[in-house]
Amino acid sequence: MFKALRFFSILALMFITSLSAQAQCAMCKAVASSSTEAGSTVATGLNGGIIYLMAFPYLIMAVVGYAIYRHRKQQTETKAD
């Protein structure tokens, strides 16, 4: 019970603190702003690249979490037998 509470409190803290984070550095933001005003699609490509790079750590964490879940489930099934 304590482990689950600690896990969810850390997870909530991570989400709360990430809300104020900037997705781009100052130079990238300046280039994206100026290119958008000029009619270029550089900002769209830059934001797409950020989302692409952001997706892989979450995907890796999901795969590792699923592997841990399956391993623990197999352990409890073998102990029950």
Image (tube, grey):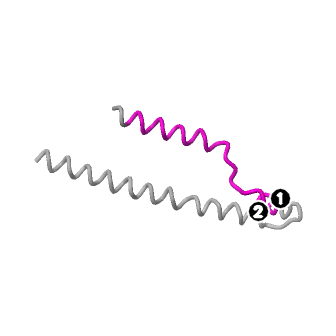
Q: How far is disc 1 from disc 2 in space, using C-alphas?
A: 7 Å
Callout 1–callout 2 Cβ contact below 8 Å: yes
Q: Quadrant of residue 37?
A: bottom right
Q: Is residue 31 left or right of residue 11?
A: right
- The N terminus lies in which quarter of the figure? top left
Packing grade of label 1 (10 A; few <14, some 14-19, many >=20) is some
For the point 48% across and 59% down, the residue is 59
Residue sticking out furthest to the left: 81
Q: Secondary structure at mark 1?
A: helix
Q: Is residue 28 magenta?
A: yes
What residue did someone put label 1 on? 33
- Residue 43 position, x and y percent, is 76, 62
Circle 2 — which element?
helix
Considering every residue shown, the one lying at the far right of the view is 38
Q: Is residue 81 left or right of residue 74?
A: left
Q: Is residue 74 above or below residue 43?
A: above
Of the residues under marks 1 and 2, which one precedes in the sequence?
1
Q: Quadrant of residue 49?
A: bottom right
Q: Where, by quadrant of the figure, is residue 45 drawn?
A: bottom right
Q: Position of residue 76 (x, y in %)?
A: 20, 46
Q: Main secondary structure of the magenta part?
A: helix
Q: From the viewer's perspective, tell me whether residue 48 is left or right of residue 61.
A: right
Q: Would you say 59 lies left or right of 32 here?
A: left
Segment colored magenta: 4-32
Camera-nearest residue between 21 and 49: 21
Where residue 3 appears, x then y in whole percent? 36, 36
Q: Is residue 20 magenta?
A: yes
Q: Which residue is mark 2?
A: 43
* Residue sitting at x 77%, y 56%: 26
Marker disc for residue 23? none
